[in-house]
Amino acid sequence: VNTKNHEENTIRTTKIQIVGNTKNWKKEYLRTITYCYSKYPFFHDVFPLVEESINTETEYFADINIAMIKRFCDALDIHPEYIRSSEIDYGGGFKSDLNLNITKAVGGDVYISGPSGRDYLDLQSFKDAGIGVVFNDYDHPVYPQRRSKEFISHLSALDLFMNVGFAEAKKIIMEGNEHFYNFDKSVSDIR
C-alpha cells in the first residue's frame, strides 16, 4: 500500500502502491499465491475466490480486502451485516471514544476488543453507555498444515482454507466461541 501521508489517510482512502514498473501487480500476486499453494488440498476451491477479489476494479486496498472478506464469509456460510464506518455518522472520536461511538451508532450492546484494548479503553464510558466490553485473547487453533513438520501459527486465514477447506475451517474458527453468546454485558475476559 502507499504509505505516503499515511497519518492523514483513513483505511478507506489508502491506495495500492505500484512499485517501479510493476503495472500488473495483481498477476504477480496471484502467481505468488499459486506458487505457494497450488499443491494444497483445497487450492481449487479457494483460489478462484482470491482471484475474483484481487481482480476487483479499484485503486483502494480496503475495497479488495472487503471483497475477499465477503467471499470468504459466503464460502463459510457466515452472513454478517457489513457496515463501513465511513458510511455512518458516529460523531468522530479517537481510540476508546471512536470504538464506543461506532458501537452506539450501529446499535451494538457489546464491544469485542483484542487484548490491547485493556491499555486504552475507557471502560467506565462503555458501562455508562450500557455497552458491555469483552476482551478476546486469541488462542490460535492448530490445524494440519501441508509441508510443515511443526505447526506455524498466525498465518493468514488463506493458509487455513487452503489446508482444510471451508467446512472444516468453519468448525475450527467456531470452536470455543460459545462464550460470546452467554455473558452479562459487564467487562469480561475471554480466553
Image (cartoon, grey):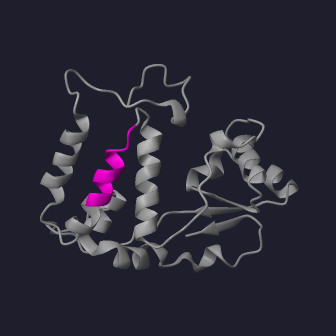
The x, y position of residue 156, in whole percent, is 34, 57
Q: Which quadrant would the N terminus be assigned to in this image?
A: top left
> In the image, what residue occupies the spot 24% across and 35% down?
25
Is 14 magenta? The answer is no
The one of 24 and 33 positioned closer to us in this rendering = 24
Image quadrant of residue 79? bottom right
Is 53 magenta? The answer is yes
Q: Is residue 143 visible?
A: no
Q: Is residue 32 visible?
A: yes
> In the image, what residue occupies the spot 18% across and 72% down?
41
> In the image, what residue occupies the spot 67% across and 40% down?
95
The x, y position of residue 148, in whole percent, is 16, 66
Which secondary structure is most common in the magenta stretch?
A: helix
- Total labels drawn: 0
In this rendering, the answer to whether 107 lies above or below 13 is below
The one of 162 and 135 positioned closer to us in this rendering = 162
Q: From which residue to which does the magenta span run?
A: 48-57
Q: Which quadrant would the C terminus be assigned to in this image?
A: bottom right
The x, y position of residue 29, in whole percent, is 23, 43
